[in-house]
Image: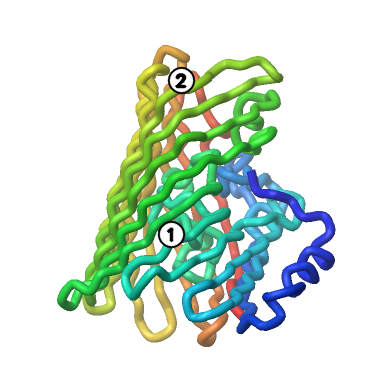
């Protein structure tokens, strides 16, 4: 889980103690202020990892967030990055999202050590930065996992390949989540989750109007429910591809992922397809996302899909206003999540 920092001012002061006072330090940030409500049905799960839930009353908590990032260039090769975030869905506690040291080995290779976002999805690194995409939030059925960060090492390789931008990211690590938000809500019990021995690779290539990304991760899972061990050293795998196209004023975004846990007979497919059209400062868009899990030995058959229609208005270079309508169909028989729902959301995103 995210590490919570109760004494944030003291923590920041410590960062500037010693060598960091000689570093080139920059501070940036982002925020999303979003209000929404369910217009049909009872509840809408807008943020799976943090369990941001809308009901029939207007609320700002499920999607509202603010993040601050500090970058310290110690020298030409060594950088330090830390990012803290506060989410309404998590009670506005200040949580540690990034905290790592990066060392530039040469012009193409760098190595990073510390806490980072787990790069399973295309939008993993900037999931909370609403200004970076045209939705109110990334498609909910495609971003449903209980673990969002990892602590470990990553090696980045960025070669020059003709006119293509290329990135290879190899990483290893683990994450321990005490009383995991999503699993504890779904199981109505205290669930502790550990993803360990994770080894993953991400490959990204882009050129002009096309972006392609492939990702793979394997590792092991430990889980306790109400302090009773239910899973230990369970192998799991995640794979995904995404392809984005920018043709004239059209934007076509797609992502397809698969999660497997053979020992538990769990096989989950998620996918999304989105089309937007940008004219002047306005971008209307429509998206469909799906989550599909067949009946397994544990009795799970979770299935849901969402159709989203929205509009983004870029007010200026740092601020965007958005409105979005979501229709959720929850068709799982043994594991319905929160049922069918329609919801409306309005928000403002900005960066600073």
Q: Would you say 341 lies left or right of 251 here?
A: right
The answer for how far apart the CA atoms under marks 2 and 1 are is 30 Å
Residue 29: x %, y % from top left: 62, 74
Q: Would you say 127 lies left or right of 186 here?
A: left
> Which residue position holds label 1?
309
Residue 43: x %, y % from top left: 62, 40
Nearest to the observer: residue 206 or residue 340: 206
> Which residue position holds label 2?
300
Q: At numbered mark 1, what does the secondary structure look like: helix, strand or loop?
A: strand
The residue lying furthest to the top in this view is 297
Residue 332: x %, y % from top left: 45, 26
The residue lying furthest to the left in this view is 162
In the rendered image, is residue 89 in sight? Answer: yes
Vertical comparison of 229 with 128: above or below: above
Q: Earlier in the sequence, mark 2 or mark 1?
A: 2
Q: Residues within 10 Å of mark 1 (few under 14, many from 20)?
A: many
């Amino acid at each position: 889980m995210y590490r919570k920092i109760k004494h944030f001012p003291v923590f920041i002061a410590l960062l500037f103690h010693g060598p960091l006072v000689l570093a080139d330090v920059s501070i940036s940030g982002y925020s999303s202020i979003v209000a929404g409500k369910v217009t049909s049905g009872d509840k809408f799960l807008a943020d799976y990892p943090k369990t941001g839930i809308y009901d029939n009353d207007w609320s700002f908590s499920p999607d509202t967030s603010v993040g601050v990032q500090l970058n310290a260039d110690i020298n030409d090769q060594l950088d330090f990055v830390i990012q803290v975030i506060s989410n309404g869905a998590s009670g506005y506690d200040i949580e540690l999202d990034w905290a790592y040291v990066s060392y530039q080995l040469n012009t193409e290779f760098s190595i990073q050590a510390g806490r980072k976002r787990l790069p399973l999805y295309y939008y993993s690194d900037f999931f909370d930065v609403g200004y970076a995409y045209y939705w109110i939030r990334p498609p909910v059925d495609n971003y449903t996992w209980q673990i969002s960060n990892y602590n470990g090492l990553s090696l980045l390789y960025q070669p020059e390949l003709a006119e293509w931008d290329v990135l290879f990211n190899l990483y290893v690590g683990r994450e321990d989540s005490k009383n995991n938000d999503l699993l504890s809500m779904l199981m109505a019990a205290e669930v502790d989750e550990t993803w360990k021995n994770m080894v993953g690779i991400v490959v990204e290539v882009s050129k002009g109007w096309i972006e392609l990304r492939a990702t793979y991760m394997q590792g092991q899972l430990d889980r306790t429910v109400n302090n009773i061990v239910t899973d230990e050293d369970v192998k799991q795998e995640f794979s995904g591809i995404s392809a984005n196209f920018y043709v004239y004023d059209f934007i076509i975004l797609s992502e397809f992922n698969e999660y497997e846990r053979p020992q538990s007979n769990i096989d989950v497919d998620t996918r999304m397809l989105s089309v937007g059209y940008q004219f002047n400062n306005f971008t209307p868009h429509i998206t469909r996302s799906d989550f599909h899990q067949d009946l397994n030995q544990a009795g799970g058959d979770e299935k849901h899909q969402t159709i989203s229609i929205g509009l983004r208005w870029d007010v200026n270079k740092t601020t965007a206003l958005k409105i979005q309508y979501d229709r959720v169909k929850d068709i799982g028989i043994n594991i319905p999540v929160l049922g069918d729902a329609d919801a409306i959301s309005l928000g403002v995103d900005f960066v600073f």
